[in-house]
Image (cartoon, rainbow, N blue to C red):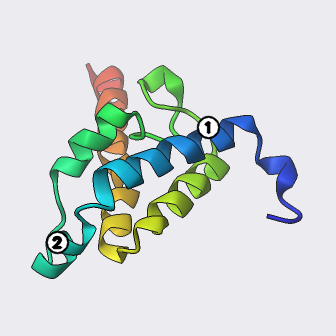
Amino acid sequence: MFGFREYFGETHTLIRQKVRKFVEGQINHFVNEWEEKGEFHKALYHIAGEAGILGIGYHKAYGCLGGNIFIQIVCIEELMQCGSACIVAGLDSLDISILKKLIDLLMNNKYT
């Protein structure tokens, strides 16, 4: 990360460790089976939520982890360690449901 060190600090290291632990504990043991079946294990969304890695990059005021694009980069880098593009693509969309909830909340506040 030469040249980008000023963007990555202790928080990024902690997130990296958290996501790495998640990948090692919840994905690596099963990824080959999922790949062979051509499946995405949908329970990973719930498990990722329990692990505290949903909503990375969205503001804490909305119940998310907070952070910035560099937090998201660290998360994706660690997810890539599982070796499955399917898993990474699926979990990289972790914030989509959070985004929908935020839009619903904003729309409800605006029009009700």
Q: Is residue 101 left or right of residue 88?
A: left
Q: Residue furthest front?
A: 29
Foreground tag (2 vs 1): 2
- Where is 22 relative to 2, above or below? above
- Camera-side residue: 111 or 1? 1
- Camera-side residue: 1 or 68? 1
Mark 1 residue crowding within 10 angstroms, few (<14) / some (14–19) / many (20+): few
Give, as a three-letter code, the residue at label 2. Answer: Glu
- Real-space Cα separation, disc 2 to disc 1, in angstroms: 29 Å
Q: Classify the position of the C terminus by image quarter.
A: top left
Residue lying at 43% horizontally and 25% vertically, measured from the top left: 62
In the structure shown, which secondary structural element does the residue marked by tag 1 occupy? helix
Residue tagged 2: 33
Give, as a three-letter code, the residue at label 1. Answer: Leu
Mark 2 residue crowding within 10 angstroms, few (<14) / some (14–19) / many (20+): few
Q: Which mark is residue 14?
A: 1
Q: Quadrant of residue 57?
A: top right
Q: Quadrant of residue 3?
A: bottom right
- Camera-side residue: 99 or 87? 87
Residue lying at 18% horizontally and 65% vertically, measured from the top left: 40
In the structure shown, which secondary structural element does the residue marked by tag 2 occupy? helix
Q: Is residue 59 left or right of residue 90?
A: right
